[in-house]
Image: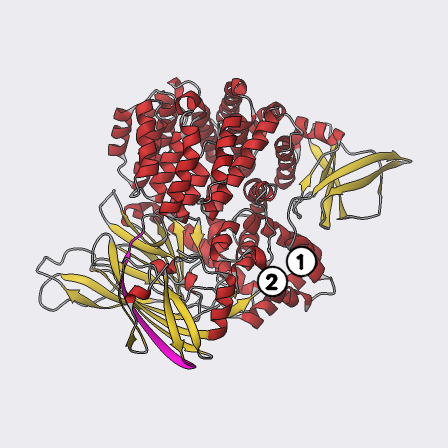
Amino acid sequence: MSALTRKEAQLRARLIDVQHYEVALDLTTGDETFESRTVIRFAARAAGDTFVELKPDELRSAALDGHPLDPAALSDGRLPLTGLTEGPHELRIAARMRYSRTGEGLHRFTDPADGETYVYTQMFLDDVQRVFPAFDQPDLKAVFEFHVTAPAHWTVLANGVTTRIGERPGGSGDGSGDGGDGGEGSGDGSAPEAGIWTSAPTPVISTYLAAVAAGPWHSVRTEHAGLPFGIHCRRSLAPHLDADAQEILDLTTACYDRFHEKFSEPYPFDSYDQAFVPEFNAGAMENPGLVTFRDDYVFRSAVTDAQRQRRAVTIAHEMAHMWFGDLVTLSWWDDIWLNESFAEFMGYQTLIEATRFTETWTGFGMERKPWGYDADQRPSTHPVAPDAAAVPDTASALLNFDGISYAKGASALRQLVAWLGEKDFLAGINTHFARHKFANASLADFVDSLAAHTDRDVHTWAETWLRTTGVDTLTPRLEESHGGWTLTVDRTGSRPHHIAVGLYDRAPDGVLEPREVLALDVPSDEILSVSGPRPALLVLNDGDLTYTKVRLDETSLETAMRDISRIPDPLTRAVVWNSLRDMVRDGELDAGDYLATAEAHVPEETDLAIVQGVLSFTRAQIADRYVIPLRRADALTTLTSIARDLLRRTEDGSDPGLRLVAVRTLVDSATQPDTIAGWLADGTVPGGPELDPELRWRILARLSVLGAAGEAEIDEALAADPSATGREGAAHCRAALPTAEAKAAAWERLFRDDSLSNYLFTATAQGFWQPEQADLVRDYVPRAYAEAVTLAARRGPAIADAAGRWALPGHEITEANLQAGQAALADPDITPLLHRKLVDHLDDLTRAARARH
């Protein structure tokens, strides 16, 4: 299918104005396809030609202003509309469309737990064409109305409030089943075959934001500020949603109220539904009035408070999009940061202001910011706001949804607020909303709105911060002077930074006490003179207000590695831990020294986000990549030691979240099966927790890797947990078994079975590659790259993304692996998304290889 180019979009936007979509979907016609009938009303500003996008299974009919169009004219996903005259037009199209199994278009899922089926749309970035025809670009906004025919016991959700307006009679029956929300009987005593639903018309929104979700949802509804609010999930998850419903609704309404305190424009839609949907490719999607979330956020098993905070951040992030992205929308995809960076920043900041999650920036620093740092140091890096020429079409736009557009952009905004002041920042945002509501805007528009409220040179700031690539590095130089010492900050990079510098002295009890915090602008010709003794620890960017790597002076590095857990503020500890992490990745700190620091201080750490961040980096990067294979067992032993120390510390039940992290780490790092096999047999960890489904599958996966479990145990576990996550757990375990037969079967599923859903593909790929099984899978290493290229071209972007993340060999740090990857990069048929993933993959392997030497 041809990607829409920016030039084509500009030409079409100059020619036509789209007013209204009326979309009728019939979801009762089979398991593989559905019927889609659409009426589009638009106007041409002048005579000319254009096209509408559509990817049907069969184009049944098309008519422009009552005149039939030749279905054979549909080519490469485009139906030409020629000979347009100036004035209004009506386009009618009927098509049979195909359901998706990869989370794109209209995804269909049948729950193995109870046999119920659910469908939901994911129209982003250009997948509306898989559901109905559209002039598919963000600056052709229109009103949307949906009419949906669905099985009788289903409920239909959409962007606007939905109403069941009638039924389509079926054959005789007993009328059993849930009739949904409202609706009348057929009147003849027979069971209705289907319910007919309609949605209220939306305000003007972009095509990628239109949404429908249908199925026998379990729903919890309330009203707040005069609007209906609802949360929805599949029925088999009902008890788990009910357990957290009040928390989710309280978070939602608290964020809603806080955004209304910050923003002068009120919430612009008629309702706020949040649907937790199966096999969702992202964390969530900001469809106006109908936000869709991955239903992993409906927790079936015990979770840490850090995981609850992550869900809360996602809720706040998506609500921020109602203004940043939905009310005011980017004009073209080069400005995706106007959506994602703002929602990321506002999500974290608003939780601090409105909820119990008051330490969110520590979680951001440990989880999200490293994502941005890593992405920004790869060959594939790009500016937060790239030039339009760098995003010539929708295929290239899809590459930029990464740690730069999210984490780096949010970090840049946090620095902007520190430099500009919150009052002027919010004034500029509200001016932006007022100027461009229900329309489209660009970076230049936003900067102009900010500039209206400050004397600072915001235009230069934007050029310096948003149009450049790479991560700056700030390094302190301390020199003795008469009666004190001086501080000079060296900068590698090009951006100005407004930072805090924290000075810490060691107290008699060993705690690092803050002496003072200095405000500093970098670069500066000023050499800062400070009286008194040199501090035991000096931390640049204390408070993490800017986006930069920081280094420690020699004394501070020694103090950090000896006393990092004695720094009183968790956000400061996060900054220091990230400094050590960056030094390992840059080859300036031995991985063994990082391990030793983790072993000494993680058992004393009190912040869950820091514990999880350090252990995750240690397990996934240091143990699996950065240490040579002969030292890997030692690294896993160190992780096991840390986990056991945490277990001893939490055996009184005082911190169940920390104990859960310890148990997970011990399971994932086990080199001998006996202990965790005993837990699985007993159904509990001594002293807790009891083994819930997540822990059972985690243990079984590790036992599968170690050869201490097999097909019989996997079958037994799946019989006990026949849910969707149970199927994914079983797929992971089967692929992880250390036998040639298991690997061959998993390989066939990955690269030959096109019915494999996006989630089952990911689970299988995650199980396949195991560092312990390097000899067993070595022959698959060169094959993986060529197979991934073919697979991505055949199955599309979602599977290309999953293959690039999980189906390539990431633990084989060898020249042969790198050469195989480079050969795939040269393949002219490689899709842009897989190309980007492969570039990043090879850069990570190269960095690990350097660290080993």
Residue 235 got which mark?
A: none
Q: Which residue is mark 1?
A: 462
| Residue drawn at 26 percent across, 54 percent down | 216
For the point 78% across and 34% down, the residue is 535
Looking at the picture, how far across and down is residue 824, in whole percent?
47, 38
Magenta stretch: helix, strand or loop mostly: strand
Q: CA distance from mark 1 to mark 2?
A: 9 Å
Note whether 571 is above or below 563 in the view shown. below
Residue 88 among magenta residues: yes
Q: Is residue 401 above or below residue 819?
A: below
Coordinates of residue 493 in the picture (x, y in percent):
71, 45
- Residue 333 shown left or right of residue 789 in the figure: right
Q: Amino acid at mark 2?
A: Leu
Q: Nearer the viewer, residue 33 or 763?
A: 33
Say what secondary structure mark 2 lies in: helix
Q: Residue at x 33, y 63 (%)?
A: 74
Residue of label 2: 443
Q: Earlier in the sequence, mark 1 or mark 2?
A: 2
Residue 173 horizontal/vertical position (percent): 9, 58
The span picked out in magenta is 85-100
Residue farthest to the bottom, as pictured: 87
Q: Is residue 616 above or below residue 318?
A: above
Residue 99 falls left or right of residue 549: left
